[in-house]
Amino acid sequence: MKNYKCNVDSLYEHFSSLLGTNEKIAFEIKRFVNLSSYSTFHVGGECPLMLLPTNSESLTLIISYLNEKHIRYLILGNGSNILFDDEGYDGVIVLLGKSFGKIELIDEDVIRAYAGAQLVTVCNTALSESLSGLEFAYGIPGTVGGAVFMNAGAYGGEMKDVVLSVTAIDDNGCLHTYKADELDMGYRHSRFSDSGEVVIYADFKLYKDEKLDIQNRMNDFMTRRKEKQPLSFPSAGSTFKRPEGQFAGKLIQDCGLRGASVGGAQVSEKHCGFIINKGGATSADVKSLIKKVQDTVLSQTGFMLECEVRIIPFRE
C-alpha cells in the first residue's frame, strides 16, 4: 500500500460513523479507487478515498470537515478537463454525480441545474421548454459545476452569456449566491477558479424561441463537433487555451506537430488542438507531449501555449 499522507483508515472510520446519524446525511464511501475510470483521458492512478454525497447537506458536512482538518480534497464531476497523475491523488475525491444532477424550470425562462447535471441533458431540457441560449454547450462533455468553474464555451458562446446566478459552498460550509456580475467570468476562468468554493447549482437565463430552430442549431453544433474533433479517442477536450489573436490548433499544425506522439499520447491528426489517448497512454506520456508541443511552438512562433487541462499532481 502507498504511503499516503492522509490517514485513510481514520477518515474512513470518521465518515462511516456519520452515516445513519441524520436522515439528511447520506453519501457513499469508496476506498482505493482507480481514477482512470473517472477521467475522460482514461489515465491516472489510485486515490485512497472517494466520497459521493447525495445532497447539499452531506456535501456541506464533508467540505467543512475536510477544510477544518486541512485535508487535501478535489471536487470532481465528469472528469472531462482533468489529467490525473500516474501515482494517483493523495487526498480525498468528492464526486458530484447523479445525485447532483437535478434540473428544474424555476421561471418561464430560467433553468436551475445542479453541479452534477450533464450539459447535454441541460441543453435537451432547455429544448423541451423551447428555451434558447445554451445551444453552444450541446456536446461539451462536462457537467454544470465544471462548466461554470472554467466558464466553458464553444462556437462563440460561453457560460457567462447565460448564467444568471450561482450558489456555492465556501470553505466553512456556508452557502452563498452570486449574481452574474460577481462571478468574475473571463476566458476559461471564474471566481471559483481561485476561491475554492464549490458550485452547488447555477441558474441559466434563457429566452423563448421556436423549438425547431433551437433543435437545428443544436444539430449543427453537434455535426461540427463530430466532423472536426477526435471524439472517438479519450481526451480532455481542447488541450491548450487560445492565444490572443491566434488558434492553438493552427499554431501546432504549422509547427509540423500533427500526429506527434509520446508513448500512447498523440497530437490528434483530426484536430491539432487536442492531445488524445491513442491507446495505453500514461499521464507521463500526456505531460511530456504537452511540454514538447509548448516548447516547439514557443521556439518557432514565440507563442507560449497555456494548458487548458487541469493537471492534478499526486501531492501538492
Image (spheres, rainbow, N blue to C red):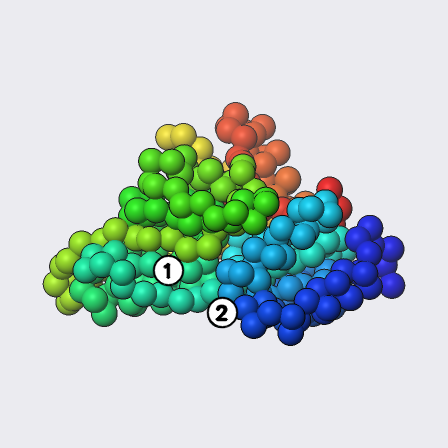
Would residue 146 appear left or right of 42 to someone viewing this image?
A: left
Asked whether residue 174 appears in the rendered view, the answer is yes
Q: Amino acid at mark 2?
A: Ser
Mark identifier at residue 99 = 2
Which residue is drawn at the image coordinates 39% and 42% (left, top)?
A: 178
Which residue is drawn at the image coordinates 44% and 33% (left, top)?
A: 243
Q: Amino acid at mark 1?
A: Ala
Q: Quadrant of the C terminus?
A: top right
Q: Position of residue 187 (x, y in %)?
A: 41, 37
Q: Secondary structure at mark 1?
A: strand
- The vertical placement of 124 against 184, above or below, is below
Q: Nearer the viewer, residue 33 or 286?
A: 33
Which residue is drawn at the image coordinates 33% and 59% (left, top)?
A: 112
Q: How many discs mark residues in the rendered view? A: 2
In this view, the residue farthest toward the left is: 210
Q: Position of residue 104 (x, y in %)?
A: 32, 65
Tag 2 or tag 1, which sits nearer the N-term?
2
Mark identifier at residue 113 = 1
Residue 211: quadrant of the picture:
bottom left
